[in-house]
Amino acid sequence: MRNEHFKNCFWKRIKLKKRHEIELIAKMCYKLANETQCHYIVDVGSGLGHLSRILCYMYGLRVCALEAQKCLCTEARKLDDFMENTMKNYFNISINQNLRVAHLNVKIKTDHNGSDILEAVKKAFGIDNDNIQFGIVGLHPCGNLGPTLLRLFKQSTQVKFLNIVGCCYMKLTTFGYPLSAYSQKNNYELDYSARELACHALEAYVAKLKNGEFDQLKVHAYRAALEKLITDRQPNMYHSQVNSVKCTNGLVFAEYCRKATSNLDIKLSINEIESLQIKNYLDNWKDVVVFYSLRLMIAPLVENIILLDRLLYILESDYNCEITSLFNPQLSPRNQVLIAKK
């Protein structure tokens, strides 16, 4: 019972998907730390620090957590305090304050070589030494942040290993793809539509089709109709990032539009939303499902193109690198983990 309580205190405010990812990637980090004899780790984009706490308190690693949002850093420290109080009250374990997770509010430059990470490491670990060695873990670094970490690994002797899972490929620029000399030599390109497609989940969509969960599939028709409304009003807002909205049973299109655009500087009228043209689009939602299904068939291929470019980029420097399917794709669609070590 005590052991179960000890494990459970790590999972405060963590959903099943995130727990699944954190458990597996933390084990991989620990394995890499032992293989490279490097027990300092930088968690980039650490959020509420769930992964950092596992690495620090369960695996005994020295951890620096870098997060761009100050409010998340503040909450992460509170969760650290909760963890330490639990360990002290239930298990009579006191944590050396010098070994706590070092949470830093740092916004990494994603069009740079990652030198700001090196500065953060020195500050976090209190070591004024340019030769301190560490590994990097990134659970879904967004857009160009992933390629920034790859560049830092390749260029800096201080970075001993890399353990990252990509996401938000549509935010990549030419800084982030292509990376490898091979891809650049062949002038490979991926447009926005292709990169956005690489972010979608094939397994979950197939399950919805098989189970006849058509209400949830209508969300793509809703999104397509909303895009039409937005670009008719303001063409410069093409491909604007709207809020994610679950298309549950009974959700009407007007309510979907309100929720999806609450983060945008645009207000659609009820006449626009309920026009005959929009009604016709929504009545033909099955056409969108067919088109989306065909399109989704090549999503894994596009993601693999991006990941193989990253693999080649590291292999060109003769470092060990591999891509492995670490997570259950039903829970975590972005389940391909890139692992590199020196």
Image: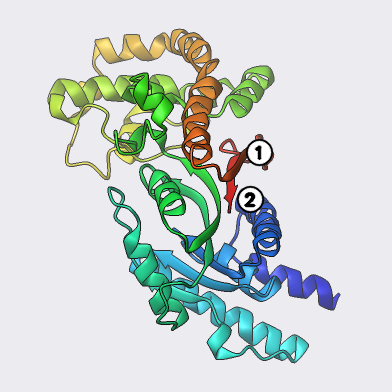
Residue of label 1: 324
Q: Nearer the viewer, mark 2 or mark 1?
A: 1
Distance (Cα) linking label 2 and label 1 = 13 Å
Give the percent coordinates (x, y) of residue 149.
43, 51
Q: Nearer the viewer, residue 195 or 32?
A: 32
Q: Quadrant of residue 30?
A: bottom right
How many neighbours does mark 1 have within 10 angstroms: few (below 14), some (14-19), or many (20 or more)? few
| Residue at mark 2 | 21
Circle 2 residues within 10 Å: few <14, some 14–19, many ≥20: some
Position of 182 with respect to 135 (left or right) is left
In percent of the image, x 65 and y 40: which residue is there?
331
For the C terminus, the image quarter is bottom right
Q: Quadrant of residue 330?
A: top right
Q: Name the foreground residue: 213 vs 118.
A: 118
Where is 211 relative to 157, above or below?
A: above
Type of the residue with mark 2: Glu
Residue 47 % position (x, y): 46, 61
Q: Secondary structure at mark 2?
A: helix
Quarter of the image for the N terminus: give it. bottom right
